[in-house]
Structures are given as C-alpha cells and as structure tokens.
C-alpha cells in the first residue's frame, strides 16, 4: 500500500470514496450476516465512515483501523465524540464508548489483535488495494480472524482498462480465488450502478460498473 498516496488524499480532501450516508447494502442486508449482539465488528481501512456509528447502534463494539490520523480525528470531531488516546506499538489508538480506531497500517496489526472479532465489514478496503496486495490482505484475514467470523465484502467490478484505480475492479472470480480456500462465499447481491452514483465514475472514463456484496464465513 502506498502510504503517501492515501495520506495525501486525506490532506487534499480528495475523498470521493467517503460516503455521507450509511451504506444501503449494509442496512438492507444486515440480517443476512446473523451477527450476535455485543459482538466486536472490525472495519479495515475505515476512514471516517458513518457505517461505524450504525454498527455501534446495533449493539456492536466497533474496532477500526485507518492509516490517516486526519481521517480518524475527523471521524470523532465530526460526530461530536471525545476519544481517549493511547499508543500501543506502532499504533495510536482512539477510543470512545463503543468505537476504537487503531491509527496505523492494517498490515502491522498483530495476530492476536482480531481474536475477539466476530464480524468484518469491508466496504472500501479490498478495492483500495492493487492486485499484488490483495492476496496478502486475504491471507491476513484468514490468519488473524477467529473461527466462525463473518465478513461482509463489498466489491466493484468494471473494465479495469477504462479507469485507473483506486477503487480497483475485483471480479467475482478473483474474490473466489482469494478467499475460497479459507472461507465459504455467498453472493448476496449484484447491481448495476447508475444515476448520480455513477456520475463520478463516468467522468473518469468508466462506461459501466457492478457492485457485488458477498458474505464470507470461515
């Protein structure tokens, strides 16, 4: 992962990937994931996503990891939250009631750090990674997650030659290749992106775009 690239995106406020509302797929498909109340939900590369507050409202304890401290601080300040901070290893950790965000590199998380996680919500992590890092990400998840964890994976599929990522196209066959050795995979939804949601991508040269939502269980 190019740290400087992502830090620069936040510094220059080039964050088109940030959604100003809770993700519709998460809300509409929530019951499909069968997540027990009071579980720990892990959100990799979380940015300042409002989805974390929604997960907290469902009774979950949220653990995020995010490279940009600007993004982390913005999440707490923008939602009127006053976190406590501490340093553990290479991470600065921001914590308030029900939400804890590790500021640092996802790949630096120690193996035991996800041992209590029961649900993973990946809306923008896998698609942010170039091809050579996606296998490492999938293997990290398989190694660090406890048995019977469930993952919501949102992926984009488009003609990669039409637009330079991120977000990158991660076709269904690649999702299967990356995760099937360690996870059961169920596709929950597939939809064509259109209207206002598609406008930004059209400006970048994209003709069509599919969103796919998967349920993974190890």
Image (cartoon, rainbow, N blue to C red):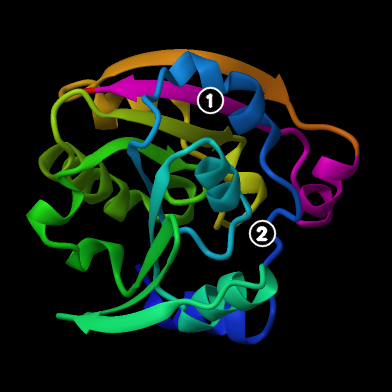
From the viewer's perspective, is residue 24 above or below residue 8?
above
Residue at the (48%, 47%) spot, across then down? 127
The answer to whether residue 158 is magenta is no
Residue 90 at x, y percent in the picture: 20, 81
Residue at the (55%, 84%) spot, across then down? 8
Please indicate whether residue 217 sits to the left or right of residue 160 in the image.
left
In this rendered view, identify the residue nearer to me: 59 or 138: 59
Residue 109 at x, y percent in the picture: 19, 63
Mark 2 crowd level (few <14, some 14–19, many ≥20, 10 Å Cα)? few
Q: Secondary structure at mark 2?
A: loop
Q: Secondary structure at mark 1?
A: strand
Which sits earlier in the primary sequence, circle 2 or circle 1? 2
Quarter of the figure with the C terminus: top left
Question: Which residue is the site of mark 1?
Answer: 213
From the viewer's perspective, is residue 206 above or below residue 17?
above
Question: Which residue is the site of mark 2?
Answer: 18
């Amino acid at each position: 992962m190019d740290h400087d690239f992502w830090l620069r995106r936040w510094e220059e406020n080039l964050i088109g990937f940030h959604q100003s509302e809770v993700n519709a797929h998460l809300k509409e498909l929530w019951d499909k994931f069968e997540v027990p109340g009071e579980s720990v939900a892990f959100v990799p590369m979380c940015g300042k996503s409002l989805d974390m507050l929604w997960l907290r409202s469902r009774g979950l304890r949220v653990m995020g990891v995010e490279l940009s401290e600007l993004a982390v601080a913005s999440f707490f300040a923008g939602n009127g939250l006053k976190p406590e901070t501490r340093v553990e290893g290479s991470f600065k950790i921001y914590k308030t009631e029900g939400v804890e965000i590790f500021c640092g590199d996802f790949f630096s998380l120690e193996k035991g750090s996800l041992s209590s996680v029961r649900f993973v919500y990946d809306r923008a992590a896998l698609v942010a990674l170039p091809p050579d890092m996606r296998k490492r990400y999938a293997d990290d998840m398989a190694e660090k997650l406890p048995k019977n964890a469930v993952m919501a994976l949102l992926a984009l599929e488009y003609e990669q030659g039409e637009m330079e990522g991120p977000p990158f196209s991660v076709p269904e066959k690649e999702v299967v290749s990356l995760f099937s050795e360690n996870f059961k995979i169920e596709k929950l939804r597939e939809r064509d992106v259109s209207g206002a949601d598609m406008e930004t991508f059209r400006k970048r040269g994209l003709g069509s775009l599919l969103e796919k939502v998967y349920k993974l269980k190890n």
